[in-house]
Image (cartoon, rainbow, N blue to C red):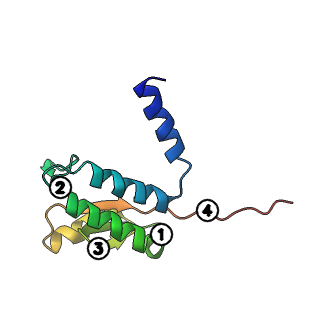
Amino acid sequence: MSAGQQLQEIISQTEKLTNEEQLKLASYLMEKLSLKNEASSIREGEKASDSMRKLEYQWLAEYRSQYSGQYVALDGNKLISHGSNAREVLAKARELGVKHPYIVHIEEDNSSTFGGW
């Protein structure tokens, strides 16, 4: 199996994980990729630090159920704003002085099981 095929298999397997498990995996991967404390991803043209991204993932893992179905604006582990409209959430975060907030939509947890007939 080629590296590309292995990657596709891993991606396929991660889609079967719960949201919380995916966040834990993402946090683990970000930690593993840290080089000189700089994240490999870019947020609005600026590199986000690994420590900042890790704090955001930890916040999401801890509080996601309380903000299910909403957009949240984070600055590290600090909730800046939240609501059902992404533009309003971003505007409020910027109004509060956060130039580059991390905006994410928290999917509703539909992991309840169906008992059948």
Q: Which residue is mark 2?
A: 48
Q: Please state which of the two labelled residues, at mark 2 or mark 1, is closer to the viewer.
A: 2
Q: Please state which of the two labelled residues, at mark 1 or mark 4, is closer to the viewer.
A: 4
Q: Residue at x 34, y 72 (%)?
A: 82
Q: Which residue is mark 1?
A: 68
Mark 3 / mark 1, whichever is N-terminal: 1
Q: CA distance from mark 1 to mark 4?
A: 12 Å
Mark 2 / mark 3, whichever is N-terminal: 2
Residue 111: mark? 4
Residue type at mark 4? Ser
Mark 1 / mark 4, whichever is N-terminal: 1
Q: Quadrant of residue 88?
A: bottom left
SS under mark 1: loop
Residue type at mark 1? Ser
SS under mark 3: strand
Q: For the residue carrying disc 2, how many other residues have a C-alpha within 10 Å: few (<14), some (14-19), or many (20+)?
A: some
Q: Residue at x 29, y 61 (%)?
A: 103
Residue 81: mark? 3
Residue type at mark 2? Ala
Percent position of residue 30, x then y: 29, 53
Q: Residue at x 15, y 68 (%)?
A: 98
